[in-house]
Image: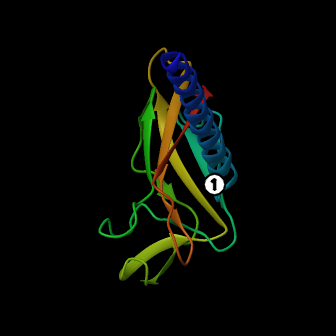
Amino acid sequence: MAYFWFITLNKYYNMKAIAILISAFLFSTTLSAQSQPVKWNVAVSPVTDGYRTLTATATIDEGWHLYSQHTDPEGPVPTSFSYEGITPEGPTVELSKADKGYSELFDLEVIQFEGKAKFEQKFRSKKGAKMMTATINFMCCDGDKCLPPSDVEFTLQL
C-alpha cells in the first residue's frame, strides 16, 4: 500500500515539476518576444550596374541604444553582418549618424545609434543563387541594463 502511495505521489510531483517548467518556458518566451527593443527591416534593391544593394534598417525603442560596427569591442558587442548566397562588394556601410560618447555601463567611449539606424551592403549575387541570407548580430542597452547579443536572420529572394 505504501508503495502505491509513493508511486502516486511521485507521478504527481513529476507532473507538477513538468507543468512548472513548461509555464516558466512559456513565460520567458513571451517576455523575451515582447521586450525586444530593436526591430529590423531588410530589403534588396534591383540590379544597377551589375550590383544590388541590401538595406537593413533598425527601429530602436526610446531609451535604448544599438551599437555601431565600429564601437570598441571591449565594451558592447558591435553590430555585425554576415551573408550567404552573395559576394559583398566592400564593407557594410552605416548610413545613419552615430553618436559617440562615454558609457557608464561600460566605462569607456562607445559609438551608438538611437531611434533608427540604417546600414547598406552593395553585392553581386553568386552564380545561380535565387536566395540570399543576411544574419545580423547585435546588442542593445538602455541606461541600466543590456540584453544579451542576438542574431536575426533574413532570407530574401534575389
Q: Nearer the viewer, residue 82 or 44?
A: 82
Element marked by disc 1: loop
Query: Which residue is rendered at x = 60% and y = 43% of the image?
Result: 24
Q: Position of residue 35 (x, y in %)?
A: 66, 56
- Which residue type does callout 1 highlight? Gln
Q: Is residue 44 at all visible to an observer of this figure?
A: no
Image location of residue 75, percent across then percent down: 35, 70
For label 1, count other residues whose C-alpha is less than 10 Å away and answer few (under 14), some (14-19) or many (20+). Answer: few
Based on the displayed image, in which of its 4 quarters is residue 44 positioned? top right
Q: Nearer the viewer, residue 13 or 43?
A: 13
In the rendered view, would you say 77 is above or below 54? Answer: below
Residue 2 x %, y %: 50, 21
Is residue 112 positioned above or below 137 on the image?
Answer: below
Residue drawn at point x = 58 percent, y = 66 percent: 96
Number of disc labels: 1
Which quadrant holds the C terminus? top right
Identify which residue, 40 or 106, lies in the foreground.
106
On the picture, is 145 further left or further right than 48? left
Left or right of 53 in this view: 68:
left
Provide residue 107's location: percent of width, then percent of height: 36, 82
The quarter holding residue 43 reads top right
Q: Tell me, what colour scheme is on the image?
A: rainbow
Position of 21 relative to 76 (above/below): above
Residue at coordinates 61% horizontally, 70% vertically from top-left?
A: 64
Q: State the residue position of label 1.
A: 36
- Residue at the location (44% across, 23% down)? 126
Instruction: Answer with left or right where residue 156 lies relative to residue 91.
Output: right
Q: Nearer the viewer, residue 120 or 39?
A: 39
The reply to whether residue 37 is in sight is yes
Q: Quadrant of residue 4?
A: top right
